[in-house]
Image: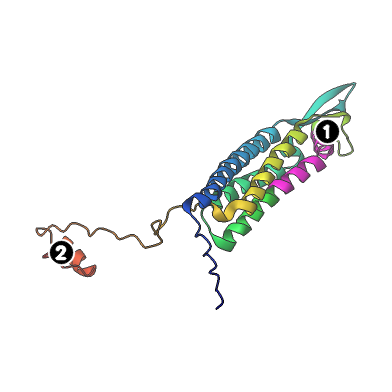
């Protein structure tokens, strides 16, 4: 007579096995929020600093000129604001919508970094100020120098990009903002409003809600 070997059932996953995933999700949320907020702050502050300096010839002398980041290009600051909005919106949506918002967050950081680097040696803003200062449409800025603020702006945008990549990778496990539903997914039940029997309007409102005002 043959013997039939019984295959032991595979153990069911325990709560301890799920704990590392929950811990990774919490850590990624904290890191993404920190990176996104810090990156947007750096971009907005660095965009307001002087990116380029020069001078314009006026009479027998020269007039100093400066241009901040927003005069050179307003794109990094605008994309930083978009990134902040996307960072908040990640927690307001779920499923495919969360993935799309996460991609938007990453793209806003990438676009901000590329636009800041591309404008690092731009001179058009100074040329425009030279025209305004001299009232000469042919005037051009001279003695051009550029600061490191465009690259600091780009580094802040890279932080936004990293926050977006974290959202793309781990966003599915992140919590969503509270809404109409409890944690178990069931709709919340509102407690019936108190009815004052001495107020006819309360009685009529209770009847409109389908409640028995005499109870």
x 57%, y 56%: residue: 172
Judging from the image, what secondary structure is the residue with disc 2 in? helix
Q: Is residue 34 above or below residue 174?
A: above
Span shown in magenta: 109-132
C-alpha span from label 2 to label 1? 75 Å
Q: Is residue 38 above or below residue 4?
A: above
Residue 130's label in the rendered image is 1
Measured from the top left, where is residue 152 in percent x and y? 74, 33
Q: Nearer the viewer, mark 2 or mark 1?
A: 2
89 or 52, nearer to the observer: 89
Which residue is disc 2 drawn over? 203
* Residue density around tag 1, few if under 14, some if 14–19, many if 20 or more, within 10 Å: many
Measured from the top left, where is residue 112 in percent x and y? 72, 45
* Residue density around tag 2, few if under 14, some if 14–19, many if 20 or more, within 10 Å: some
Tell me if residue 127 is in the magenta stretch.
Answer: yes
Measured from the top left, where is residue 139 in percent x and y? 88, 35
């Amino acid at each position: 007579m043959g013997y039939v070997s019984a295959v032991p059932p595979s153990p069911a996953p325990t709560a301890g096995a799920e704990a590392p995933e929950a811990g990774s999700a919490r850590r990624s949320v904290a890191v993404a929020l920190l990176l996104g907020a810090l990156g947007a702050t750096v971009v907005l502050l660095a965009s307001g600093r002087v990116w380029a300096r020069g001078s314009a010839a006026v009479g027998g002398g020269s007039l100093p000129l400066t241009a901040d980041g927003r005069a050179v290009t307003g794109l990094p600051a605008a994309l930083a604001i978009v990134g902040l909005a996307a960072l908040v919106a990640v927690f307001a949506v779920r499923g495919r919508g969360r993935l799309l918002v996460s991609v938007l967050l990453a793209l806003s950081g990438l676009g901000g970094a590329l636009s800041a680097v591309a404008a690092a040696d731009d001179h058009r803003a100074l040329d425009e100020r030279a025209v305004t200062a001299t009232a000469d449409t042919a005037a051009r800025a001279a003695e051009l120098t550029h600061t490191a603020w465009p690259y600091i702006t780009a580094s802040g945008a890279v932080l936004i990009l990293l926050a977006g990549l974290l959202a793309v990778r781990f966003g599915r496990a992140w919590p969503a903002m509270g809404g109409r539903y409890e944690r178990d997914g069931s709709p919340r039940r509102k407690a019936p409003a108190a009815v004052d029997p001495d107020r006819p309007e309360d009685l009529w409102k209770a009847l409109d809600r389908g409640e028995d005002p005499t109870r």
